[in-house]
Image (tube, rainbow, N blue to C red):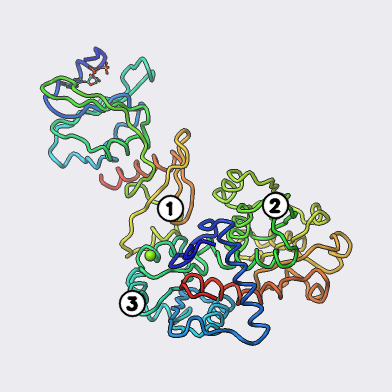
Amino acid sequence: MAPSEGLLVRRIREGTVIDHIPAGRALAVLRILGITGREGLRVAVVMNVESRRLGRKDIVKVEGRHLSSEEVNRIALIAPSATINIVKDYRVIEKKRVKLPSVIEGIIACTNPTCITRKPGEPLRPRFKIVAERPLQLQCTYCSTIIDEKDVLEQLEEAGEERR
Amino acid sequence: MRPGRWRGRDVISILDFTRDDLEELFDVAARMKEMLQRGHVPRLLEGRIVALAFFEPSTRTRLSFETAAKRLGAQTLGFAGEEATSLAKGENLADTIRMLDGYADAIVIRHKYEGSALYAAEVAEKPVINAGDGKQHHPTQAMLDLYTVKELFGTIDGLVYGVLGDLRFGRAASSFILALTLYRPRKLYLISPPLLRARPEVRARLEEAGIDYEEVSKLDDVLGELDVLYVTRIQRERFPDPREYEKVRGSYRVTRELLEKCAKPELRVLHPLPRVDEIAANVDSSRYAAYFLQARNGVPVRMALLSLILGAEV
Ligand SMILES: Nc1ncnc2c1ncn2[C@@H]1O[C@H](COP(=O)(O)OP(=O)(O)O)[C@@H](O)[C@H]1O
Ligand SMILES: [Mg+2]
Ligand SMILES: [Zn+2]
């Protein structure tokens, strides 16, 4: 375990460690995964620790939960540098990079107020096509509006505030 | 011609189609036009029902679809404007579409939300034709616009185009611009006040297609180069400051004097109509006016579209 955060959290026996998250985005990663803390999972959030690759980074450790590849890939929206470590018996048994899917469904709302996905009462999930990865650009499948990383982060932060 | 390339298809955006698709459509439209002129149209759609779901008020597009359907022997049902609101009684769009899907063979929809037509197409099994979704698409308008250009010039490629007016909120202008990306215009001028420039996704598409285009604010600067001038209305309500509107409106008015002074004799002026005062009445009788021809072409082009989609051979 890296010495910089080694003292901060106890090792987990079984679960997932999301490493190399850009500093300050750990909470947004939790929101993308739909983890609120109310699930009863043991979650450790480590923020702003030193990293050789990123200068500073965040880390999220979730005990007793494995992520589907869909969930893993959604993380790429806001943390393309993240690595996913699968931990079993206290040891990292698998490492994965996140990879943006070509389509994102749910999670992010369209910023265009007259997009059909914003019409109340319709059984419809927002859907975006990834048009560029860096810098991130998503295009609404329905109204063609293009949104960027800033829009995505703002929404995830607002979502957190609403929950509080 | 691959049979059935059109059959059963949804018509959501002009970008759903290729040049070849459109060529086929224009061939059929030309035959329809001829038959209309001869006064003899086969009842290709006898026994079919076309639903006209106009959630937003419309006269021209709706009547044009209705005429097209009826000329071919189809029947229409549907609603428009106010009626739509009372009919829905709080029902969501998905349920209204499902109902129409159960009654009709094709659904023509106009709705104020962008993406409503795609959504309707996802819900419906029958083909859905977008007759305008908010500010986004109006593909059948773009089809008849291109058809008119082709009729006038014998080609769509190689011409210099100017699209004038509200390029940001106007769906006819946006659709026409998108449609041109399927072709090779020599040059495309997007002429509008800075506030009403084409939307980012429309510009992105122009870039992607490698179209030589330029955004300009003044018509006078480019008028002399144009073969086609596509005029659209600038609405007062788009301007937060009415004085701003008063300042710009004059510079976008197309008059006969202006055309005679600056335009090439071959220039043709298009407009999706209705026009208010952005084209002076004295242009109507000039060589430049092509907008009435364009409006009339709406019927044969929509006849062609309905017959191809409903799989009725000409
Ligand atoms: N059992 C564990 N419990 C909690 N965190 C762990 C565990 N094992 C590894 N980690 C963390 O997972 C990340 C990847 O671990 P590792 O593969 O050992 O290091 P690195 O990828 O930095 O070479 C590091 O942040 C490390 O601290
Ligand atoms: Mg369908
Ligand atoms: Zn949208």
Q: For the residues marked 1 and 2, what is the alpha-carbon distance in whole angstroms?
A: 27 Å
Q: Which of B310 and B272 is in front in this view?
A: B310
Mark 2 residue element: loop
- Which amino acid type is marked by label 2? Pro
Report which quarter residue A119 is drawn in.
bottom left
Say which element carries label 1: loop
Query: For the residue marked with disc 1, what is the amino acid?
Result: Thr
User: Between tags 3 and 1, which lies in front?
Assistant: 3
Q: In this view, does B88 lie above or below A7?
A: below
Which residue was labeled with disc 3?
B102
Question: On what subunit does the disc labeled 3 rest?
Answer: B
Mark 1 Cβ and ligand 3 under 8 Å apart: yes
State left or right for residue A154 relative to residue B197: left
Mark 2 belongs to chain = B
Residue marked by disc 2: B185
Dot 3 amino acid type = Gly
- CA gap between label 2 and label 3 equals 42 Å
Q: Quadrant of the C terminus of chain B?
A: bottom right
x, y (%) of residue A124? 33, 59
